[in-house]
Amino acid sequence: MKNLRAVADIGIDTNTVTAYTANPVYMLGGLIYSVTENLDLDLGVKGRLNNGAPPTTILAGFTTRF
């Protein structure tokens, strides 16, 4: 399917809670489907790679271009 793309991201955030010493490390993976040239729908999963990050999260969204 030419309108479907797989995406992935690994990142680290700055911890805003000063009581915690570990910065949150996460991994994100998902799919983006281009409905039209100006509209994308996406679905993904974000998981933690250390205890500083939140547990697994399901993400959904859309992007419009104009």
Image: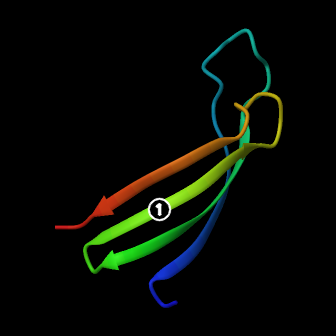
In the rendered image of this protein, does residue 27 appear above or below residue 14? below
Location of residue 29 (image quadrant): bottom right
Residue 56: x and y in percent read 71, 40
In the rendered image of this protein, does residue 52 appear above or below residue 36? above
| Residue at 29%, 70% in the rendered image | 39
Q: Residues within 10 Å of mark 1 (few under 14, many from 20)?
A: some
The residue under label 1 is which amino acid type?
A: Asp
| Residue at 73%, 9% in the rendered image | 19
Give the side of residue 44 with respect to residue 37, left or right.
right
Quick one: which residue is furthest to the right in this view?
A: 50
| Residue at 23%, 67% in the rendered image | 65
Residue 52: x and y in percent read 76, 28
Residue at the disc numbered 1: 42
Quarter of the picture holding the C terminus: bottom left
Residue 9: x and y in percent read 65, 59
In the rendered image of this protein, does residue 31 appear above or below residue 5? above
Location of residue 41 (image quadrant): bottom left
